[in-house]
Image (tube, rainbow, N blue to C red):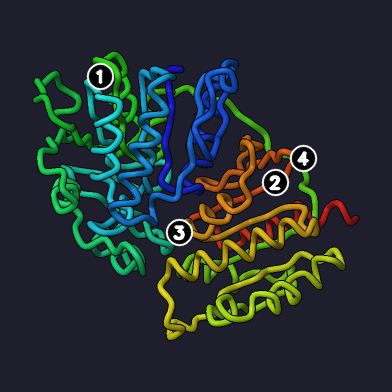
Amino acid sequence: MRYIFVADDFTGASDTLATLRRAGLNARLYLTVPSCDEVADLDAFGIATAARSMDQQAIRSEMQRIGHQLQVHAPDVVHLKVCSTFDSSVHTGNIAIAMDALSTQLKPATTLIVGGQPSLGRYCLFGNLFAKGADGQVYRIDRHPVMHRHPVTPMQEADLRRHFSDMGLTNVHGLDRVALHTDVALPNAPVLCDALDASDLTRIGERFRHAPAPQLWVGASSVAEALYPNHQTIEMPSSLPGPLLVFAGSRSSVTAAQVAASHSMTIVTVSARQLASQPQELYAQITAPLQDGKATLAVLDDDTTHGLTALEVAQYAAALIAKLVRSGNIGTLLIAGGDTSSLAIHHLQPQSIDYIGPLEAGVPVCAANFANGHRLPVIMKGGQMGSVALFDKVCELTCQNDE
């Protein structure tokens, strides 16, 4: 197995899965490390974790366990898939600890960090990260209108070398865009590569594809884009099964705009307080329109005085979503919010996840395959992803079955 990716949340995992499939690889996503026999016919596979929301001890334990189990696969490339905005912190979703834990088990000869994903409007120049906002403007990540005040992992440092140093990885060497396109010698240390456009990713792939293995790559789906630059077109299905459940667990301004623009669904407002104390009542409220075949949008209200942490809210929401799916009333599931998505999928425990097709940039449609033979289309999007009309677009795909 040449390429294995370990993702810190499900939304990122599904995006990398989509990238590999578009590159022509036979790839699949799992929640736990599969046996060699299970993946004998695959070119690549991924493991989706909830590491993005874990504390230091949990993330180290998770990555050590996964790294140990991957040894039998003898991968040439292990890709630690992190968010394209690199938002993590010392105490939550610490990327440096994840790297150290994987490295302890897999002993990489080469460690590379790709600092941007231009296809999603994420750019790294001279080691500093920039990201496009919902208004189309590009911001330094520590001045981004959303990411600098993320409720769990606010980005307060744009220089990714300093960001990694704050998390405990102090020896990152910067390979800026000028040096990237030359043959400058590199130290025996983790290398952070600039990525401003597709030509930079092509150069990264050319320069490091044949570096000593095993290789540990860290970054967004741009890692897969660098290693497998030739993509083919995969068409979206003309329809998806209904009814549709959209659960908007993200409070980002992008998701808020998508909720506000949705005019085709029954809306159920959800409070964090209800999630914690009245889950059965919420279950009944959301199930009622679904049983009538109506597309339903469940959205968290803007009450932030509930006394729960963001992670606790995501955990309660994930448990409710899993129960709703098991009711058998959902044809297609869309979840907005990285933590909520990852936790919900881990509640549901599908055997594997396949890629169906592209919905929008960074928002693929996948299928969760369950032990009983059930196959559920799932769309998991990060808070910053998707067009304003995304929810209604999915609703149209599912409602075609009723015409």
Which residue is the site of mark 1?
Answer: 207
Which residue is the site of mark 3?
Answer: 384
Rendered view: 164 above or below 214:
below
Residue count near mark 2 (Cα–Cα under 10 Å), binned few <14, some 14–19, many ≥20: many
Q: Residue at x 43, y 23 (%)?
A: 3
Work out how far the residue at label 3 is from the one at label 2, CA to CA, in angstroms.
21 Å
Camera-nearest residue between 232 and 10: 10
Q: In front of the other: label 1 or label 2?
A: 2
* Residue 32 visible in the picture: yes
Rendered view: 27 above or below 285:
above
Looking at the rendered structure, which numbered label has been put on residue 372? 4
**Looking at this rendering, what residue extends furthest in the right direction?**
403
Name the residue type under label 1: Arg
Name the residue type under label 3: Gln
Res 196 → quadrant:
top left
Q: Earlier in the sequence, mark 2 or mark 4?
A: 4
Name the residue type under label 2: Pro
Work out how far the residue at label 1 is from the one at label 3, CA to CA, in angstroms.
31 Å
Q: Tell whether 380 sits left or right of 157.
A: right
Residue contact between numbered discs 1 and 4, judged by CB atoms under 8 Å: no
Res 157 → quadrant:
bottom left
Residue contact between numbered discs 3 and 4, judged by CB atoms under 8 Å: no
